[in-house]
Image: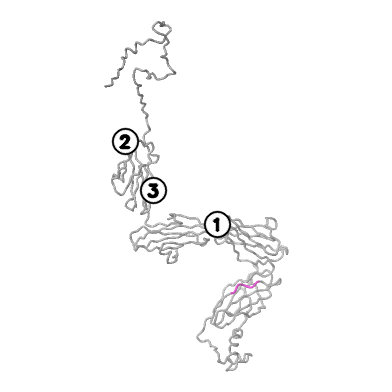
Amino acid sequence: MTSLSIGSLSDICRASPIGGEDAPLSDYQDDDYDYDGEDESTNSEGPPAEIVEEVQSEPPYFEQSDVSIEARPGDDVIINCDARNFAIKNIALWYKNATLLATGQSAINNRVEVMKNNSLRITGVTKEDADDYYCEVLPQNVRQHTALRVGAKLSILCDDRDATDRSQTFKQGDRHKLTCQTFLHTKTDIKWSFNGQRLHTSEKDAAEGVVVLDNVDEENAGVYQCLGDDGSADPPHGMVTIDVQYSPKVSTHRHHVNTIEGDTAELYCDYRASPIAISFFIKDGKTLSLSEKYSIKNSLHKEHNRTTLIIKNVEASDLGEYLCHVENAIGSNEVRIQLSYHPETPQFENSSINGNEITMHWLVRSLQPLSEAMLDYKLSMSYTWSTVSIIHTQRHDKDKGIWKITHQMELTPGLWHARIKTKNTEGWSNFSPDHDILIKDQEESTEIDDGVVPPDDLVRAGFGVGAGSKSNSACTMRMLPAVMLVGVSIAMLRL
């Protein structure tokens, strides 16, 4: 057996100091001094004493005591318990109204789950889950209330992002997709409308509740509404408002402006644009600046912006083509306006039809006297025009230089086209746009077929047709409208 001998402590204490027993006591150095406040617990007489300093921590608190969140049926919702200074000795309790849902990490209700950060997770929320939830931290009993609102049974997604009852801004030329979703157990029929009018989509898109907006432009701006028709008296519905940013749309009703030497001329253009645009006039490649000669007036006209160029004391050098140029952050556009001494392009006013007889009215603007008007007309699908020259003219509005032309003629049944141009002391105007005339068949009208002899008056007029001549009969049919022209009323009447 191995034995271990340990000397007594008294023997150690009686050990002689350095230098031997004969060393004088005055030579003994006591090394037991303070090393800058060094802890005396290093004394060899026992183990060092443990000093425990208790840290006083701040109590838990919530920066917000009341919050709210929104969800849609079927969503998985996480409700946070945002306690600051949450310590290991704290515990979080979850309540739905007054009903306990979870203690610490242990959930009492199987529809909820407590996460490691004390957040509460609810899977597949329903309308019944909407309530007041609160997290209570013990032992301080501080609370944070969360109001959970479960939204409607329908939502509208714009490019897979929820946009229900919101506004979206698109850019001209973009492509976007609107999707209408319902959260109902029953089958629903998705119906879209645009600005109050039923919107029809392809069969595939209709089945998926989708509206695809390709190459977005100004006409796509408006309110889109989705209805989930489930057969109930109050079906779910939602809407999204679409704004479109687009380059300016520029137009004018007077592409040709008549003027007279020494007068003041006004050229204008109307435009719409989003975002806001700037406008100016250009002539001969140069932007016109404000001066004694030129001035600009901006105004609103029938929901359009109108820019008017005012040219004072017109002279020959002012005649020619002007550009009204409008631009914004999306793009630019322009319209051309011709200033001349010739009459402006005639504008069709109205017409009336009585049987085969039609009366037509045009308006023409010319400060100079009109000397002549010419009417062209032809049957649809015909290659050539027939012409009627109108010699006599009369003013309609002397102050504004407006003339009214009234013409009456008789036509055979069919679709006809008519146009007119006028002449003043300086020259001819352009032709007016074609006006369509539909003359319907009359019960008492005489049909002329192949092999039928035309009336005697047509024969006497030089359109003789043999009874058996099919070619001559066809020729008569082609020339008949000119023969039936009963009266070329060329008076320009004053209203």
Q: Residue furthest front?
A: 1
The answer to whether 121 is drawn above or below residue 91 in the figure is: below
Please rate how many residues cluster around mark 2, counting C-alpha atoms within 10 Å: few if below 14, some from 14 to 19, many from 20: few
Question: How far is the residue under mark 1 from the one under mark 3?
Answer: 35 Å
Q: Secondary structure at mark 3?
A: strand
Question: How far is the residue under mark 2 from the one under mark 1?
Answer: 59 Å
**Magenta span covers which residues?**
430-434
- Judging by the rendered image, the residue that carries numbered circle 2 is 139
Residue 50, x across and y down, in percent: 35, 24
Please identify the quarter of the rendering in which residue 314 is found: bottom right
The answer to whether 416 is drawn above or below residue 22 in the figure is: below
Q: Is residue 315 left or right of residue 161?
A: right
Query: Of the numbered discs in the image, which one, if any, rests on residue 392?
Result: none
Badge 3 or badge 2: first in the primary sequence: 3
- Judging by the rendered image, the residue that carries numbered circle 3 is 69
Residue 41, x across and y down, in percent: 37, 19
Q: Nearer the viewer, mark 1 or mark 3?
A: 3
Locate the C terminus by quadrant. Answer: bottom right
Q: Residue at x 71, y 65 (%)?
A: 261
Kind of residue indicated by mark 1 = Ser
Query: Of the numbered discs in the image, which one, if any, rests on residue 274?
Result: 1
Please rate how many residues cluster around mark 1, counting C-alpha atoms within 10 Å: few if below 14, some from 14 to 19, many from 20: some
Kind of residue indicated by mark 3 = Ile
Residue situated in front as seen by the camera: 439 or 384 = 384
Kind of residue indicated by mark 2 = Pro
